[in-house]
Image (tube, grey):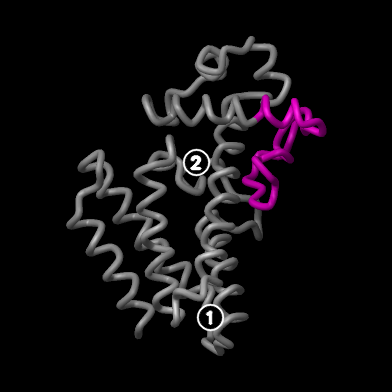
Amino acid sequence: MPERTLLADAPDGAALLRNEPVQARSTARLATLLDAAAAVVDEVGYERLTTAMVAERAGASIGTVYRYFPDRVVVLQGLSARYLQQFGERAVAIANDPRYKTWQDAVSAIIDAVASDFRREPGFRSLRFGDVLDLGQAPGSRSGVSTIAGQIAAALTARFDLSIDDLQHRLDVALTIVDALFSRAFAEKRSGDSRFLSEGKALALDYLAR
């Protein structure tokens, strides 16, 4: 059975699976299963998700689900890994976007992208980057937020020639603030409570400005 840790660099959580997809059809089937899992999590929360629910939503047999996912935990890990991969790519693209003239502008846009995923990505508000899954991290492993912070720090440093000590750690702290307050914002209102959203962004940017 695969090790139960969040493998951030595994596309769509493939390294967590019983059978890693090697053909286009298998990859599409995996994506369909993860889409189904995301829809279920969006409706009932990750705590209540079962492999049977995933199979039903995907229109697949339970055997098909177990072909890729040994249990519900690996479904959730795979879904979290997909969120992590997709957002990491998006954040790096924003950091390198010439429309943002300063690194502060880029970080502000990245924070806006977090709010956007809370709104539009099914299941994201429940799982985010997988840090809510209390499975016990392996020694030396990084959280999902830390992984994203590292990717953003590398992109910003390369583009803006930054020499800020502990930039990754500072971004980790800022994103943790955002994650906590944005989670509260979307717990209060499905569309996100603007007060928590604005305060979360302001606190994170003020912290980085110091």
Where does the image place residue 133, in percent across and percent down from the top left? 50, 41
Q: Position of residue 2 (x, y in %)?
A: 74, 35
Q: Which residue does the numbered mark 1 point to in the structure image?
A: 166
Crowd band around label 1 with a 10 angstrom C-alpha radius: few (<14), some (14–19), many (20+): few
Q: Quadrant of the N terminus?
A: top right
Left or right: where does residue 140 sit relative to residue 198? right
Instruction: State yes or no: residue 2 in magenta.
Output: yes
Residues at circles 2 and 1 in contact by the CB criterion of under 8 Å:
no
Residue nearer the viewer, 132 or 123? 123
Q: Which kind of residue does numbered mark 2 sit on?
A: Leu
Residue under label 2, please give it.
133
Q: Is residue 74 left or right of residue 189?
A: right
Give neighbour class at mark 2: few <14, some 14-19, many 20+ (Cα, 10 Å). Answer: some
Whole-percent x, y for residue 127 in the image: 45, 41
Q: Vertical placement of 96 versus 191: above or below? A: below
What is the residue that sits farthest to the right in this orientation? 22
Q: Earlier in the sequence, mark 2 or mark 1?
A: 2
Residue at image coords 64%, 51%: 8
Amino acid on which disc 1 is placed: Asp
Rendered image quadrant of residue 200? bottom left
> In the image, which residues are magenta?
1-30
Q: Residue at x 38, y 78 (%)?
A: 208
